[in-house]
Image: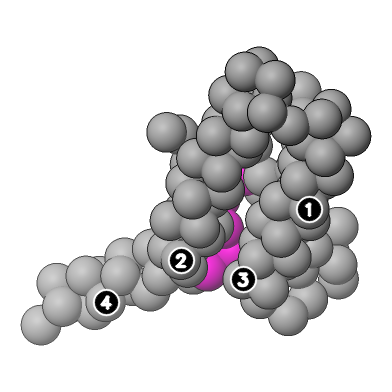
Amino acid sequence: VSTQSTGGGKVGSRFQVACVEIRTRMADYREGELSLGYVRRKVAEVGRRIKEEVERDVPAGWQCSFDRKEQRYMYRNVRTGRTQITHPGEDDEEEEEEEEEEDDSLY
């Protein structure tokens, strides 16, 4: 199962559970056990849960949206308008590590 990292780690596992849930519902539908309306409602419900989880993981001042064409999350800084594909927290952590390495090399 493929997951999109949002930086927090928790979304991936919940996303995997959601994928299994949808696959199970689809298999049941194909076997004639569920109606199409029920499956559509469940898919929409799972989609909302995933979206809420991803949005909760985004730092203040950022917006997150899923780019269907690119099949990945995009993050937009509300103040600057800048967009990126990496989680805003991931960039900050990498920059801090690089700065620490530079500081260490000065001594």
- Left or right? Give the position of 72 relative to 20: right
Residue flagged by tag 4: what amino acid is it? Glu
- Residue identified by numbered label 4: 100
Q: Evaluate whether residue 63 shows in this view.
A: yes
Towards the viewer: 20 or 47: 20
Residue 16, above or below 23 = below
Task: Write down the region rendered in magenta.
Answer: 85-89
SS category of the residue bearing label 4: helix
Q: Report the residue at 10% width, 82% height from top.
A: 107
* Separation (CA) of disc 4 from disc 3: 26 Å
Q: Do the residues labelled 3 and 1 touch (CB within 8 Å)?
A: no
Residue flagged by tag 2: what amino acid is it? Lys
Q: Report the residue at 55% width, 34% height from top.
A: 24
The label nearer to you, 4 versus 2, is 2
* Separation (CA) of disc 3 from disc 1: 19 Å
Q: Evaluate whether residue 40 shows in this view.
A: no
Tell me which numbered mark, 4 or 3, is placed earlier along the sequence.
Answer: 3
